[in-house]
């Protein structure tokens, strides 16, 4: 590999928050025409690093260099002017604006001495970018009507609309289908060929070895090591990340499977899914697998009372239940941990203890007066059980790492003592250590007699944790496999409509 001088560097950068040293004298080098994978568990400092690079945070100590010269990135506009752009794990877009408006928000094209907005030029450029990334989207379409994967493509197009020199991709494939991931790889390779310096943040090792040229590992806010991908293997990277050997990535334990807890019959929706029939039993993890757009999440949201158009027979513990709202679902013993934890799973500006106690305010405060001591006790019980890493239970959820945010959301619903817990992409965007913790906890739940439904687009996760696997394709159940009979080839074949069960 041809050696270049780094286009962007950090040296001895430190960033401290109350009670937490998020970055501790870290270093980083990004090279033109190369992809550097930033690797580390949640809490390693990756998000803080990205915010420091893009001017959201200012370092307490250390230096930032751009093309060898020291710089100060005082705000996001400074970063944009330099050509530093980031596509974040949780896409920041505007649902009520069009694709074109989202792509050029804050960076509008103008014309004439009065600098009027040049919508024809922006729409033409939008079409060029969408064609480049092979995204069949209407430039005038509102984002509200797009899927998560399509919204992510808009975020990528937005970054490409600027003449970026440094491109940060933060968990870019978390919501993408296999086909969309391959398209993203093609985009990244075009950016490399154009001489861009790319930082790729992911927890998926197949992606690291497929796309990256270099790696940098952080642990607990500190720099651990760096090198060429060609000179390292997955086992070494994992040990660098966690300072221990992860010999069992899926800590599945056998649990006694009991009687049916949730039975769904003839469940239908006019546009999202049809003829859905399944049962999940006490002590069982039932996996739902399918590509983006297969209807997995839509089924779970309908069961939870978020979709008014769904119809069918739902029974919990042998009794038919009418679930018209999430409150009905919670009362019946069904809870839902959503895929989009920041938008749907937590109120991120509130502290941990208020998030965990939120569904039970009436129970905790029967006289109508808030008892913070009771809310703290509940948060302590479930926060400790899930090993949430925080400076205190009063810490805002927004200041936690992604893995710890997910633990707070899970803890909130477990505190209601449900009979069935639906976990939609439970390890999306969290590191290998936090994934293992969530998987261990899932095993504990079924050992205690809970019924767990796990929706996941991670094939190894489904095969490693589920007792049975339901495969979906275009709104239909196309197969149901026992874990002993499941193979990756068969599951993927069903999910793509290629083979019959």
Image (cartoon, rainbow, N blue to C red):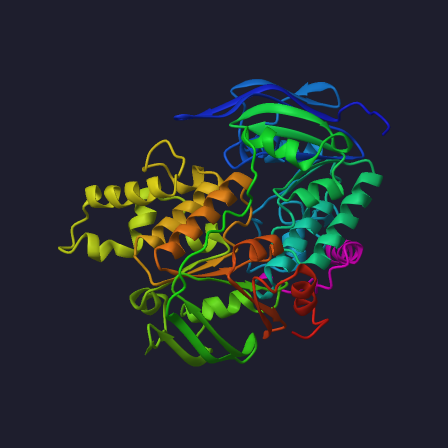
Q: Residue furthest left?
A: 367
Q: Which of 175/279 is in front? A: 279
Residue 232 sits in quarter: top right
Spot occupied by residue 372 in the image (x, y as percentages of width and height): 21, 43
Is residue 44 found left or right of 210 in the rendered image? left
Residue 344 sits in quarter: bottom left
Location of residue 50 with respect to 190 vertically, above or below: above
Q: Quadrant of the N terminus?
A: top right
Is residue 185 found left or right of 246 in the rendered image? right
Q: Which of 446/212 is in front? A: 446
Is residue 85 found left or right of 350 in the rendered image? right
Q: Quadrant of the C terminus?
A: bottom right
Residue 86 sits in quarter: top right
137 falls in the magenta region: yes
Q: Examine the rendering and report whether any part of residue 180 can be seen.
A: yes
Q: Examine the rendering and report whether any part of residue 29 can be seen.
A: no
Location of residue 468 with respect to 200 vertically, above or below: below
Spot occupied by residue 75 in the image (x, y as percentages of width and height): 58, 32
Q: Which of 65/327 is in front? A: 327
| Residue that appears at 51% across and 28% down | 220
The overriding secondary structure of the stretch rendered in magenta is helix
Is residue 497 found left or right of 175 in the rendered image? right
Q: How many marks?
A: 0
Spot occupied by residue 275 in the image (x, y as percentages of width and height): 53, 81
274 falls in the magenta region: no
Q: Which of 401/260 is in front? A: 260
- The span shown in magenta is 119-143
């Amino acid at each position: 590999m041809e050696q270049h001088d780094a286009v962007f560097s950090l040296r001895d950068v430190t960033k401290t928050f109350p009670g937490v040293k998020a970055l501790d004298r870290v270093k980083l080098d990004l090279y033109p025409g190369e992809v550097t994978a930033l690797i580390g568990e949640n809490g390693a400092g990756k998000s803080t690093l990205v915010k420091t690079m893009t001017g959201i945070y200012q370092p307490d100590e250390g230096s930032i260099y751009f093309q060898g010269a020291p710089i100060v990135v005082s705000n996001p506009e400074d970063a944009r002017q330099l050509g530093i752009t980031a596509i974040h794990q949780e896409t920041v877009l505007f649902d009520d604006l069009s694709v074109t408006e989202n792509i050029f928000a804050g960076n509008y094209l103008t014309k004439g001495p009065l600098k009027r907005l040049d919508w024809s030029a922006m729409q033409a450029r939008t079409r060029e970018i969408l064609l480049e990334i092979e995204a069949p989207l209407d430039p005038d379409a509102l984002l509200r009507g797009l899927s998560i994967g399509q919204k992510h493509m808009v975020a990528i197009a937005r970054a490409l609309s600027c003449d970026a020199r440094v491109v940060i991709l933060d968990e870019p494939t978390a919501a993408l289908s296999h086909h969309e991931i391959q398209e993203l790889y093609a985009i990244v390779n075009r950016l490399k060929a154009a001489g861009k310096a790319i930082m790729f943040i992911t927890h998926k090792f197949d992606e690291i070895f497929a796309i990256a040229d270099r790696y940098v590992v952080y642990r607990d806010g500190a720099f651990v090591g760096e090198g060429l991908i060609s000179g390292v293997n997955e086992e070494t990277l994992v040990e660098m990340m966690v300072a221990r050997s992860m010999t069992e990535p899926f800590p599945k334990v056998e649990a006694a499977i009991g009687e049916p807890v949730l039975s769904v019959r003839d469940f239908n929706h006019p546009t999202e899914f049809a003829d859905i029939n399944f049962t999940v039993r006490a002590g069982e993890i039932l996996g739902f697998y399918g590509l983006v757009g297969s209807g997995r999440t839509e089924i779970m949201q309908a069961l939870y009372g978020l979709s008014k158009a769904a119809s069918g027979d739902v029974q919990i513990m042998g009794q038919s239940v009418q679930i018209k709202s999430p409150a009905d679902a919670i009362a019946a013993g069904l809870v839902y941990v959503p895929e989009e934890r920041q938008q749907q799973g937590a109120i991120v500006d509130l502290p941990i203890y208020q998030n965990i106690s939120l569904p039970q305010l009436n129970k905790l405060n029967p006289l109508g007066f808030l008892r913070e001591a009771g809310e703290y006790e509940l948060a302590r019980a479930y926060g400790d059980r899930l090993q949430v890493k925080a400076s205190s239970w009063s810490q805002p959820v927004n200041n936690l790492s992604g893995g710890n945010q997910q633990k707070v959301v899970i803890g909130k619903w477990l505190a209601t003592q449900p009979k069935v817990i639906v976990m939609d992409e439970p390890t999306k965007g969290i590191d290998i250590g936090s994934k293992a913790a969530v998987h261990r906890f899932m095993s504990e739940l079924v050992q205690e007699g809970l019924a767990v439904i796990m929706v996941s687009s991670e094939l190894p996760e489904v095969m490693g944790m589920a007792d049975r696997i339901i495969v979906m394709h275009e709104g239909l159940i196309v197969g149901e496999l026992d874990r002993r009979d499941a193979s990756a080839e068969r599951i993927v074949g069903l999910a793509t409509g290629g083979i019959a069960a």
